[in-house]
Image (cartoon, rainbow, N blue to C red):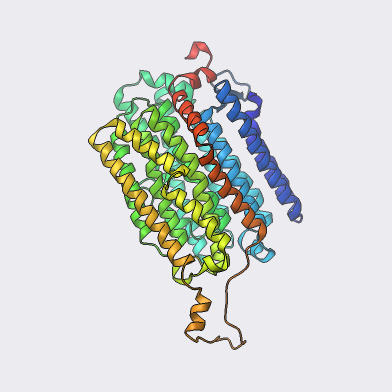
């Protein structure tokens, strides 16, 4: 079973190589990409089952004596994250494949998009399965160069500007990550996560605190935590809809995953939990206030993305099994729902001609299916019962109430307020984009004539391709599946949370003499 751990990276890299070698065969490129992502999803599903039944599994690469080699490790947490990520990536890829030829050439040219998309997935897979800090750094760097290419597809001024901001911030965080890795290695003589968990115990508390702060700041930039999140709303909205969807679903969650892994494995008795709790409160509140102020749907969703990272950081800061279980559940939920909403926004922009609320209206009448596709994940994001967003938030709020500290109660109150404000933001989109009359009907009512003299009203709307609708619908159904199977999934996340602190990860990676 351990041999399967290398398969997600190999499938993605091999698929990218084949796609890159066949720039003149777009059909073959698409087929290779779909097969690669389907294979990764299948491997992740097998790893989920195996780690739940047996426990963590490790694979050592490089033929070096342990713990000098490169370790890949799968446990319940990493397997679940990889499975949800692969499902989202597959649906996003199918959405991109459904674009018409002109849109593909302009937004996601096949010869560039498919190989880069697969390399992005290779980086995500490597980050989730990395068993040492340097390999985690490699995964982040694969994400960086792939995402920069995807972010600037089309070469428009807005995308180049957004890409420049994104890469400057990412390079700074990468430099800080290298400094963190160097410091960890200087203090302990290893970068293997399991080995670090053993050796960090021998360091003094001030040294441990310094190393922890370095790593948390690095990952906080990746996860877009307050006050290190200002880069995100200016970077994501300019990209094509498929790119924005996969960014929103996956990139920040890799940062959240890294915080979960290092805080539970390396710093189980962290002295910075209160600081994380305060950061989670500000992340929630500042993010959702930014969302309320927006009239462009992509920017609004970018701010809600920041805001809901706060829920996950709150669960981590509680340092309890209940809080961690709810965080893992909510992370899987949010990967799915946030990506779904960005895909729906792509359909809104196509059908309505814009993603600005000032230019939309009446979509419920002209595209009722699109209204349903927006309404379900929007209510899920807002935490309306009995959807998975409500279940995850309820678990987090209960864990906060169980902690019982004044700070925890303050964050619980902030979480409730954030959920209500998220509902207001989603209602704002619904009221202005789906109710009322369409802009064309409004122009006719005002007797506005066509200024280009062709005898027809100007209309930027386009029909929604069936494959794009189908891919979005599949992701909506998957999100509903998280609600239908919330009971078994929550049991799984509780088991994952318990395993994070029971020493099974270390036992799976290190021989007995090194523990």
Q: Residue at x 34, y 38 (%)?
A: 397
Farthest residue in the left direction?
406
Q: Image quadrant of residue 111?
A: bottom right
Q: Which residue is drawn at 53% across and 60% down?
A: 371
Which of the pair 396/187 is nearer the observer? 396
Closest to the observer, 281 or 397 = 397
Q: Nearer the viewer, residue 91 or 386?
A: 386
Residue farthest top in this picture: 513
Locate residue 481, reporting x and y percent: 55, 42
> Is residue 423 at all visible to an observer of this figure?
yes
Q: Residue at x 57, y 53 (%)?
A: 149
- The answer to whether any part of residue 182 appears in the image is no
Q: In which quarter of the image is the N terminus?
A: top right
The x and y percentages for residue 277 are 31, 38
User: Compared to 49, does 467 lie above or below?
Assistant: below
Examine the rendered structure and indicate whether residue 201 appears above or below residue 130: above
Left or right relative to 474: residue 28: right
Whole-percent x and y of residue 288? 36, 53
Question: Left of 32 or right of it: where is 349?
Answer: left
Say whether residue 94 is left or right of residue 407.
Answer: right
Quarter of the view holding residue 204: top left
């Amino acid at each position: 079973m351990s041999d399967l751990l290398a398969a997600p990276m190999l499938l993605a890299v091999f698929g990218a190589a084949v796609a890159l070698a066949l720039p003149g065969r777009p059909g073959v490129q698409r087929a290779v990409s779909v097969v690669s992502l389907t294979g990764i999803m299948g491997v992740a599903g097998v790893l989920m089952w195996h780690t739940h039944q047996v426990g963590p599994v490790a694979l050592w690469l490089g033929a070096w004596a342990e713990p000098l080699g490169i370790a890949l490790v799968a446990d319940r947490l990493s397997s679940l994250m990889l499975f949800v990520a692969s499902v989202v990536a597959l649906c996003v890829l199918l959405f991109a494949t459904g674009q018409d030829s002109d849109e593909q050439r302009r937004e996601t040219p096949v010869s560039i998009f498919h190989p880069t998309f697969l390399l992005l997935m290779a980086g995500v897979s490597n980050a989730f399965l990395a068993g040492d800090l340097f390999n985690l750094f490699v995964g982040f760097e694969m994400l960086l160069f792939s995402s920069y290419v995807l972010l600037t597809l089309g070469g428009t001024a807005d995308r180049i500007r957004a890409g420049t901001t994104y890469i400057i911030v990412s390079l700074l965080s990468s430099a800080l990550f290298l400094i963190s890795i160097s410091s960890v290695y200087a203090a302990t003589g290893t970068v293997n996560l399991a080995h670090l968990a053993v050796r960090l115990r021998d360091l003094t508390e001030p040294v441990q605190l310094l190393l922890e702060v370095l790593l948390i700041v690095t990952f906080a930039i990746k996860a877009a935590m307050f006050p290190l999140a200002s880069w995100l709303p200016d970077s994501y909205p300019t990209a094509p809809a498929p790119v924005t969807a996969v960014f929103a679903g996956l990139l920040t969650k890799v940062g959240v995953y890294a915080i979960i892994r290092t805080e539970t494995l390396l710093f189980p008795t962290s002295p910075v939990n209160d600081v994380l709790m305060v950061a989670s409160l500000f992340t929630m509140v500042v993010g959702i206030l930014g969302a309320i102020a927006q009239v462009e749907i992509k920017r609004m969703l970018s701010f809600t993305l920041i805001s809901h990272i706060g829920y996950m950081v709150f669960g981590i800061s509680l340092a309890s099994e209940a809080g961690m279980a709810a965080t893992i559940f909510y992370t899987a939920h949010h990967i799915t729902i946030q990506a779904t909403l960005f895909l729906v926004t792509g359909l809104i922009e196509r059908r309505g001609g814009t993603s600005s609320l000032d230019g939309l209206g009446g979509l419920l009448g002209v595209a009722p299916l699109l209204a349903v596709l927006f309404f379900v994940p929007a209510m899920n994001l807002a935490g309306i019962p009995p959807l998975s967003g409500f279940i995850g938030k309820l678990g987090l709020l209960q864990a906060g109430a169980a902690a019982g500290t004044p700070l925890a109660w303050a964050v619980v109150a902030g979480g409730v307020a954030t959920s209500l404000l998220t509902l207001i933001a989603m209602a704002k989109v619904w009221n202005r984009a789906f109710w009322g009359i369409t802009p064309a009907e409004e122009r006719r009512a005002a007797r506005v004539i066509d200024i280009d003299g062709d005898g027809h009203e100007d209309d930027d709307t386009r029909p929604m391709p069936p494959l794009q609708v189908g891919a979005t619908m599949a992701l909506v159904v998957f999100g509903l599946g998280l609600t239908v199977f919330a009971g078994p999934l929550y049991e799984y996340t509780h088991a994952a949370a318990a395993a994070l602190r029971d020493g099974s990860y270390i036992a799976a990676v290190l021989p007995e003499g090194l523990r």
